[in-house]
Amino acid sequence: MRRYVVSKSRFAGGKSIKLVAHELGGADYISLNLYRLRSGARLFPCEMSHRKVMEFVADLQVHPGHGAA
């Protein structure tokens, strides 16, 4: 199982979220922006496929005080 250090930043009163994850001891990197628009949520991966980002988010398990795994 890969482990990551994940940071999440909120902007515009929570209407915009940026998530960045770096694999611990590895080279994997995840970066995305999520915008909550009136027309619905829009996901914009940063220089990677939607599939990679969606799989990462779907599998994300947060361990309080320990980051994400």
Image (cartoon, grey):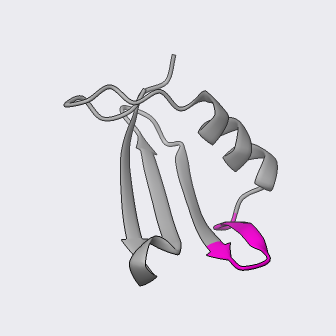
Residue 43: quarter of image: bottom right
Task: Residue at 30%, 35% (x, y): give it.
Answer: 67
Q: Nearest the camera: 20 or 37?
A: 37
Q: Quadrant of the C terminus?
A: top left
Task: State left or right for residue 16 relative to residue 67.
Answer: right
Q: Main secondary structure of the magenta part?
A: strand
Residue 3: x and y in percent read 42, 27
The residue furthest top is: 1
Task: Residue at 53%, 42% (x, y): give it.
Answer: 28
Residue 45: x and y in percent read 68, 63
Q: Is residue 33 magenta?
A: no
The residue furthest bottom is: 12
Residue 18: x and y in percent read 48, 66
Q: Nearest the camera: 18 or 49?
A: 18
In the rendered image of this protein, does residue 39 appear above or below residue 26?
A: below
Q: Is residue 42 magenta?
A: yes
Task: Residue at 58%, 68% (x, y): give it.
Answer: 33
Task: State left or right for residue 69 relative to residue 58.
Answer: left
The residue furthest left is: 65
In the rendered image of this protein, does residue 41 appear above or below residue 26?
A: below
The residue furthest front is: 38
Q: Specify start and end residues of the magenta stretch as a single range.
A: 36-47
Residue 54: quarter of image: top right
Task: Residue at 38%, 32% (x, y): give it.
Answer: 68
Task: State left or right for residue 59 relative to residue 17.
Answer: right
Residue 10: quarter of image: bottom left
